[in-house]
Amino acid sequence: MVRHRLVIKGTSALLGQLKTVASRRHGEAYRYFASANQDILVYGANTDVGKTVACAAICHQALVRGQRVAYIKPVQTGDETDAAAIREHCSRGGGMTDALRLETLFHYPSPESPASAAEKAGARPPQDAEFREAVLASLRKEREEQSGVLAILETAGGPLSPGPNHTFQADIYAPLSLPCVLVGDSKLGGISATVCAYEALVARKQRPKAILFIGSEGRHSNASAVQKALPDVPVISVPSTPPQQEPLTAWLSQDQVAKGMSALLDAEAESEASSLEEHLRLDREHLWHPYTSMVKPGLVWPVRSASGCHIQLEDGRRLVDGMASWWCAIHGYNVPELNAAAAHQLSQTSHVMFGGLTHRPATDLARVLLSCVPRGLSRIFLCDSGSVSVEVALKMALQYWATQGLPRKCRIATVQRGYHGDTFGAMAVCDPVRGMHSLFKNSLPQHLFAEAPALARPKDANEGAASDSDGFASMEEMLRQNAEDVAAVIIEPVVQGAGGMRIYSPSYLVKLRKLCNDLQILLIFDEIATGFGRTGKLFAAEHAQVTPDIMCVGKALTGGYCTLGATIASDDVARRVSGKDGTQPLMHGPTFMANPLACSLAAASIRLLLQGDWQHRVAAIEKQLAKELLPLKEHGAVSDVRVLGAIGVVELRSPPKEPAKLQQALVRQGVWLRPFGQTIYTMPPYIISEQELRCITKAIVEVLEEGIELTD
Ligand SMILES: *Cc1c(COP(=O)(O)O)cnc(C)c1O
């Protein structure tokens, strides 16, 4: 194995710069969580249920176990602080307080709700994000100052009590994904209060690890009723505390209290780990992933949620997303405008059949889609996915000639290194050699393949039309020889995606359009990957200023929210497909054709794109990718670097020996990239910031630097 080091001048300075920025950026939040999923956020079913006493007992037991403990009270109102009470309770036992640290983050002396107490104090209450940042900073500080520290955080009031900024406690803390426990209410009416609090937490994805009752014993106690109602969560019950004036020392040392707190500390770790394990087992044993074996599946990383340009993993790590989920999530994840569109449409109609019925989402999508596709395309077939839109395009092309009495024109011409989908018709026009489909060769129709277009070089634009720098000659020869049998040419304009991330000259498409016209061959552009701004133009066809007869879109059509494809044809295609008297139907009609939910998302996504400054964003991404990736051309393990629009491709001299290791190394760098074959490439959401994109390019530079067995 040869380890390639980065030696080019100028790049090491860039690398240094990238390193600092990246560690500053995503070192923060997730590094804390990755190391410490044992901390406990303590909620109460109500005020006055013994939250502080419960915290004292948890702290005490952890101290007895020899652990270092940090008690953090994010919001405190009133003169006396809970932190002081905790110190008081835990110090009586003697000698353990060195291992206990206390912190109060926001303190307002007036004894009332946090919002009004803040107002009385004349203080500007922290915004929710600021508040969380303060909590995270405190957790990080504890972690830095003492290793192995267990943090106990006490909330204020119940889960739906408002915080300083009026947001519910549970909503403030939810994004932190901290393990939590709920202190139950032992009083009359406490069963309902406890179950309500529990459900409010579950609704916010914060299922408590345990429910703790103080002074609720016996067969008819609240504790046993709650355990019956919620059999899946451990309910732990400890004896009542002594009257208020007496110290808690004796109570804290009681056997039952010690045992209860031990159970609570242990239950916590176990349930988190075991549910994740079960989740991954189900995945491993029962679910196929794309292009993988069911028997020996590859590595998968469990995702908890995604928002903006970040994918949050179950262990709390946040990865910067460089894939836009395979070209789709152009606006990033969890987009308010798209969430709203989906929610609105759900309350109207999620789905109705399109046979004999129509609906506003479909016609609305037609309007907005036609406002932006190349001129001349006007007839739309809405279908399930990219592959299906290709099937429909091929059907249209064959039917176009059949209805004119030319059934002989039934072969499809295309180029090598293409990719058009995984269904049979689409698969038959994918690259015949390197494609993933050689297994099915004998069941596929035999189509015609020209050499792949030549890779674009910057000087192409200036070369004369006579030169074959774009590699069109092979296609020209093939079409001239077979014109009478060819129904259509299908091609991915300007960028060949999954077949190798190849960028070629638009001049190829200009020549292809002209030749197809001359030879009476239809031209199909597969814009499934390139559509909606990815290459710097709204559609890649615009680079060549040509209009195909049929165009396929998918992927980013719904902004990455759900599956939808569209085959968009010219008026001429629609007319001829329908036969001389116009009665010939197009024989295709998927169950979920024009699904209203998908259509409303697509319309909202396209509007969001057109209203925003996508052109500047994509241009800025292109510029930055060029600046930060092109220097890698000098790297020994790299054969080529290509950038167009929001696409950056680093091609290696040979495929990595162990792709899984490369993937793991990238995740360790805090980014989500999915190298394919011998390319490491990125097509990030357009909303990615300069710093986030730098994390991505830096991660690519870094894995090459590490030399993850890239070559033999
Ligand atoms: C992804 C892709 C397809 C297939 O789309 P699916 O939605 O996965 O069926 C077809 N053509 C191109 C160019 C693609 O990138």
Image (tube, rainbow, N blue to C red):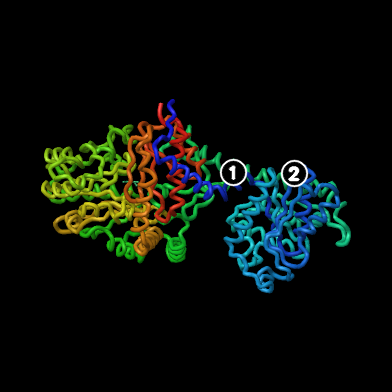
Q: Can you say whether 134 is above or below 478 in the image?
A: below
Q: Which label is found at residue 203?
A: none
Q: Quadrant of the C terminus?
A: top left
- Between circles 2 and 1, the one closer to the viewer is 2
Q: Which label is found at residue 276?
A: 1
Label 2: which secondary element: loop
The kind of residue tagged 2 is: Gln
Residue toward you, 171 or 23: 23
Disc 1: residue Cβ within 8 A of ligand 1's nearest atom: no
The number of callouts visible is: 2
> Nearer the N terminus, badge 2 or badge 1?
2
Q: Position of residue 44 (x, y in %)?
A: 71, 60
Q: Mark 2 points at which residue?
A: 67
- Answer few, some or many: residues within 10 Å of disc 2's Cα (few below 14, many 20 plus, some between 14 and 19): some
Q: Position of residue 21 (x, y in %)?
A: 49, 48
Residue toward you, 699 or 376: 699
